[in-house]
Amino acid sequence: MNPALPATRRRFLELAMRMDALRFGAFTLKSGRSSPYFFNAGQFNTGASLLALAECYADALAENGVAFDMLFGPAYKGIPLSTSLACELARRGRDLDVAFNRKEAKTHGEGGTLMGASVAGKRVLIVDDVITAGTAIREAISHIETAGGTVAGVVIALDRQEILDPAQPISAVDSVRNSTGVPVVAVATLADLLAFAADDATLQLHHDALLAYRSSYGSN
Ligand code: OMP
């Protein structure tokens, strides 16, 4: 067992493997890149696995000391993730507001793009699944700022540690950090997945493909 892999990261990767949320093969990403692995947070599809995932997010946040007043889950996958994190934080003694966006604005009833608690005047933590190029997170930031909130941080399960542009070898996560000035906390990264795969007999098969992908698109 790789002693360098911290407990929360290992726990998350074991959970993701158990729920089949990490798959290996050939996948086309939103960015158009062909990746030898894919993280599908939709596989956390039971109460127990969502709770275990929320514990990983809560531990990663506690380890990183981010200050925030409420949670925001970008549609769609961020909605169950932020909701289960809100439940876990309440269980730990912090009962916080939570809000989400709709992909399509509602024109009847209460209307609008956001639902849940108001973000106006609040320090908002975005809870999402994965960052590749950072497009989804930038959209979430814009929803919150348009509604009068301040983004206080971002927490994701997996940082794929990819560069946007070979001419600027900076990861998408670092680019979000630099352009917004807010902390981005990842439960685990591609580097953690590589350390985990090096130890695991069933994953060693994919280790070389992960390394090759990192040498093409990785930030380190
Ligand atoms: P960016 O917007 O490029 O940061 O990509 C994040 C989004 O890509 C996620 O919200 C997913 O819709 C999708 N995605 C995954 O879910 N898992 C992956 O491993 C990779 C991607 C992706 O397409 O890059």
Image (cartoon, rainbow, N blue to C red):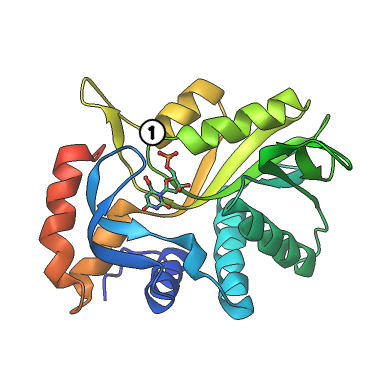
Does residue 66 show up? no
**Residue placed most toward the observer, 4 or 37:** 37
13 with respect to 108 (left or right)? left
The quadrant of the image that shows the N terminus is bottom left
52 with respect to 98 (left or right)? left
- Looking at the image, how many numbered discs can be counted on the residues? 1
Quick check: is the Cβ at mark 1 less than 8 Å away from ligand 1? Answer: yes
Whole-percent x and y of residue 210? 18, 55
Above/below status of 107 relative to 42: above
Above/below status of 8 relative to 184: below
The image quadrant of residue 203 is: bottom left
What secondary structure is marked by label 1? helix
Whole-percent x and y of residue 7? 44, 69
Q: Residue furthest front?
A: 108
Whole-percent x and y of residue 89? 73, 62
**Residue placed most toward the observer, 97 or 188:** 97
137 with respect to 214 (left or right)? right
Whole-percent x and y of residue 207? 15, 63
The residue at 23%/68% (across/down) is 197
The type of residue carrying mark 1 is Ala
Residue placed under numbered mark 1 in the picture: 172
